[in-house]
């Protein structure tokens, strides 16, 4: 849109042009029109092509908020176990498990609440929760040390691989700020079915271990069976992340190409 604005002198020259038509060419040359080009107003926000740009998503979705809550309750849960407050620890652990179920349901039921960040954040929160609880239970002799080592080693390896892919997927120049920017999703995680089963087995193991001192069944033979079952599922789940399955587990999202230097 072009808007023409005239000063007082230019309006006076236009008046003379009407009266003296013979001098029209001379007067027109002396008039300097100053067009002002107004930028177009976008009523709708233009969307970019996700295939050619990095995928940036919201952080504060309902599933992600519930996941942050689960991460925040993990150290509290560990403290309750170490101080032998098992009823309170069991209640808080059940609450944390419910937040895991609810955020997963919301992300599946409402696609607008799903995010690539959530696909990484949710299993990360599970590993933080399980790791702290397992360490606390081993500290009070409710879980054997060999099972603690097996569970932690698997989770540490997976988190190391995920961190490596995160750093690798960030476009150069790589800075700590860009790597830690949660809004810039560069890798999406697709947990295997065996991994989901293993998470359920581990949750059952930890629930029974916290309930054992309350109901006094810690020294029964059933706990040895639970230990063996959890070790088996952990080992099989570890193998499911190796080989060809690892390529389908971590998906690299498209990133914008860096501009080429001009010749």
Image: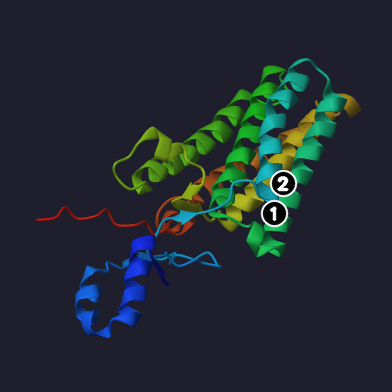
- Image coloring type: rainbow
Q: Residue furthest bottom?
A: 22
Furthest residue toward top? 83
The mark found on residue 44 in the picture is none
Report the Cα–Cα distance between label 1 and label 2.
Answer: 6 Å
The answer to whether the residue labelled 1 contacts the one labelled 2, judged by CB atoms less than 8 Å apart, is yes
Element assignment for label 2: helix
Q: Is residue 7 visible?
A: no
Q: Quadrant of residue 203?
A: top right
Residue at the image point whose x is 87% and y is 26% from the top: 87
What's the residue at 68%, 61% (across, down)? 108
Residue at disc 1, secondary structure? helix
Instruction: Give the residue drawn at x 29%, y 57%.
Output: 257
- Across and down, in percent, residue 255 comes to 37, 56
Above or below: residue 201 compared with residue 21: above
Query: Which residue corresponds to mark 2?
Result: 100
Q: Nearer the viewer, residue 138 or 129?
A: 129
Residue at the extreme left of the image, as rendered: 263
- Residue 218 lies, with reference to residue 165, above or below; the image says above
What residue does disc 1 label?
Answer: 104
> Quadrant location of the N terminus?
bottom left
Taking depth in this image into account, of 158 and 64 the one nearest to the observer is: 64
Res 74 visible: yes
Q: Is residue 186 left or right of residue 118?
A: left
* Within-10-Å neighbours for mark 2: few <14, some 14–19, many 20+: many
Is residue 252 rendered to the left or right of residue 130? left
Disc 1: CA contacts within 10 A as few (<14), some (14-19) or many (>=20): many
Rendering coords of residue 161 (x, y %): 42, 42
Q: Position of residue 138 (x, y in %)?
A: 67, 22
């Amino acid at each position: 849109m072009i808007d023409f604005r005239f000063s007082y002198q230019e309006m006076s020259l236009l008046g003379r042009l009407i009266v003296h038509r013979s001098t029209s060419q001379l007067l027109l040359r002396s008039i300097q029109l100053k067009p002002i080009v107004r930028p177009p107003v976008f009523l709708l926000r233009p969307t970019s092509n996700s295939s050619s740009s990095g995928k940036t998503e919201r952080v504060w979705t309902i599933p992600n908020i519930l996941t942050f809550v689960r991460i925040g309750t993990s150290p509290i849960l560990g403290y309750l176990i170490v101080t032998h407050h098992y009823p309170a620890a069991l209640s808080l652990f059940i609450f944390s498990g419910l937040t895991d179920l609810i955020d997963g349901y919301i992300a599946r039921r409402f696609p607008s609440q799903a995010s690539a960040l959530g696909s990484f954040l949710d299993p990360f929160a599970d590993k933080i929760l399980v790791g702290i609880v397992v360490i606390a239970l081993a500290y009070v002799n409710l879980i054997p040390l060999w099972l603690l080592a097996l569970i932690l080693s698997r989770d540490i390896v997976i988190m190391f691989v995920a961190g490596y892919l995160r750093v690798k997927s960030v476009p150069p120049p790589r800075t700590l700020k860009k790597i830690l920017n949660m809004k810039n999703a560069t890798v999406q995680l697709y947990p295997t079915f065996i991994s989901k089963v293993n998470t359920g087995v581990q949750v059952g193991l930890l629930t029974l271990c916290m309930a054992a001192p309350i109901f006094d069944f810690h020294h029964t033979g059933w706990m040895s069976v639970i230990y063996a079952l959890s070790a088996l599922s952990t080992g099989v789940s570890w193998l499911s992340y190796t080989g060809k399955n690892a390529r389908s587990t971590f998906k690299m999202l498209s990133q914008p190409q860096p501009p080429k230097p001009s010749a």
